[in-house]
Image: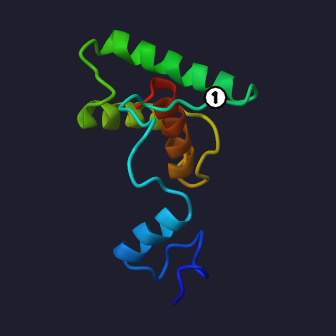
Amino acid sequence: MSTEQAKGCWRGLNPDEQIEAALRDGLSEDRPGIDSNPVHRKLAPSSEPRYVAMMEVWKTYERKYPSADPRNMEDIKHFAEAVGRSTPFRLDKEMKKATVKTVRNKMRQFHVAVGA
């Protein structure tokens, strides 16, 4: 399989071919302009309220659990469970609870909001 045919699709390439394809596609050999600071993307104006709302939920959670840290796996799992159990949207018809997809989307919003 030619890496030219596979541009944009890594399927079928071994790791060496993946890196070579990335270099041909413009990946710099060295890392100029890359630092250790996180890259925060700008949200669309219509998306901002949802992310702000998730931060408010986190702040409330932190008041209830002051030692909570979004980088701690146990804390984030407990927070995800709290979000799932309190979300009234897109309910699973049988279980009458938020779907996995709904909780996953809310947690994604939270992670973008905190920059994790």
Amino acid type assigned to the residue bearing label 1 in the image: Lys
Q: State whether residue 91 is above or below residue 74.
A: below
Colour mode? rainbow
Q: Quadrant of residue 115?
A: top left
Q: Name the residue under label 1.
A: 42
Q: In which quarter of the image is residue 5?
A: bottom right
Front residue of this view, candidates 41 and 19: 19
Front residue of this view, candidates 96 and 51: 51
Is the residue marked by circle 1 packed among few (<14), some (14-19), or many (20+) residues within 10 Å? Answer: few
- Residue sitting at x 55%, y 42%: 105
- Quarter placement of the C terminus: top left
Could one spot residue 81 in this view of the protein? yes
Q: State whether residue 31 is above or below residue 78.
A: below
- Residue sitting at x 39%, y 37%: 81
Image position, residue 93 (x, y; %) = 61, 53
Q: Is residue 8 left or right of residue 64?
A: right
Q: Helix, strand or loop at disc 1?
A: loop
Image position, residue 32 (x, y; %) = 43, 40
Report the label total. Answer: 1
- Residue sitting at x 38%, y 79%: 14
- Residue sitting at x 57%, y 78%: 6
Image position, residue 39 (x, y; %) = 49, 32
Front residue of this view, candidates 27 and 57: 27
Image position, residue 56 (x, y; %) = 52, 16
Q: Is residue 44 left or right of residue 65?
A: right
Could one spot residue 86 in this view of the protein? no
Q: State whether residue 20 is above or below residue 35.
A: below
Residue extending farthest bottom: 1
Front residue of this view, candidates 78 and 94: 78
Q: In which quarter of the image is residue 82?
A: top left
